[in-house]
Image (spheres, rainbow, N blue to C red):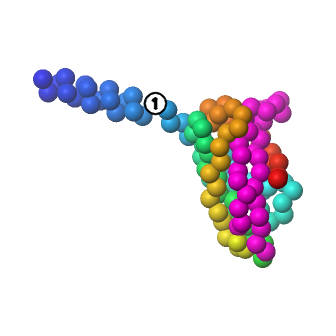
Amino acid sequence: MKRAYKIFIFCGIFFALISGISYGFIRDGAIRGKSGLSFSNIAYNFDSLNVTIRNTTKYNVNFGGTMIFLDRHYRVVAKAELMQAKIKRHSSRKYKGFFSEGSGHEAKSARYLEWEFN
C-alpha cells in the first residue's frame, strides 16, 4: 500500500514538472536604436515572457514595442508585445510581454532578437 502511494506521488510530481511550463533564457544585450538601453533576464513560457530593461542614461525614457524572435535564417518565429511604460534614469524595470505571433515554445529556437518601437 505504501509503495502504491509513493508511485502515485512520484507520477504526480513528474507530470506537474513537465506539463505546461517551459522556460528559456537568452543572453543579455544592447537594444539597437535606443542608446543607453539594454535587456537581460528574458524568461518565457508558452503565452508570455518576462524581461528586464536597464536604462543607463541620465534621462527618464518611455519604452515599449515589439520583440521579434528570428531563427538562424532570419525568419520570424515569434513576436511578443511590450506595453509602453516609463523607465527612470539609472534604473531597470521588469516587463511582462505577451506573444502576438507564435509562442514561447517557438521562441526557444530563436537565435536573434530584433526590436520594433511604437
Q: Nearer the viewer, residue 81 or 34?
A: 81
Indicate the quadrant where residue 91 lies: bottom right
Find residue 6 and report its image quarter: top left
Which residue is rendered at x = 80% and y = 45% of the image?
Answer: 114
Q: Which one is nearer the viewer's eye here, 58 or 25? A: 58
Residue 117 % position (x, y): 82, 52
The secondary structure that most of the magenta stretch takes on is strand
Q: Position of residue 72 (x, y in %)?
A: 79, 32
Question: Is residue 110 one of those drawn in magenta?
Answer: no
65 sits left or right of 15 in the view? right
Mark 1: which secondary structure? loop
Is 51 placed left or right of 116 in the picture? left
Mark 1 — residue?
A: 19
Local crowd at mark 1 within 10 Å, few (<14), some, or many (≥20)?
A: few
Chain part drawn in magenta? 59-87
Please provide percent x and percent y for residue 32. 84, 54
**Placement of 84 over or under 6, stated as above or below:** below
Residue 48: horizontal and vertical position, in percent? 61, 42
Residue 110 can be seen in this image: no
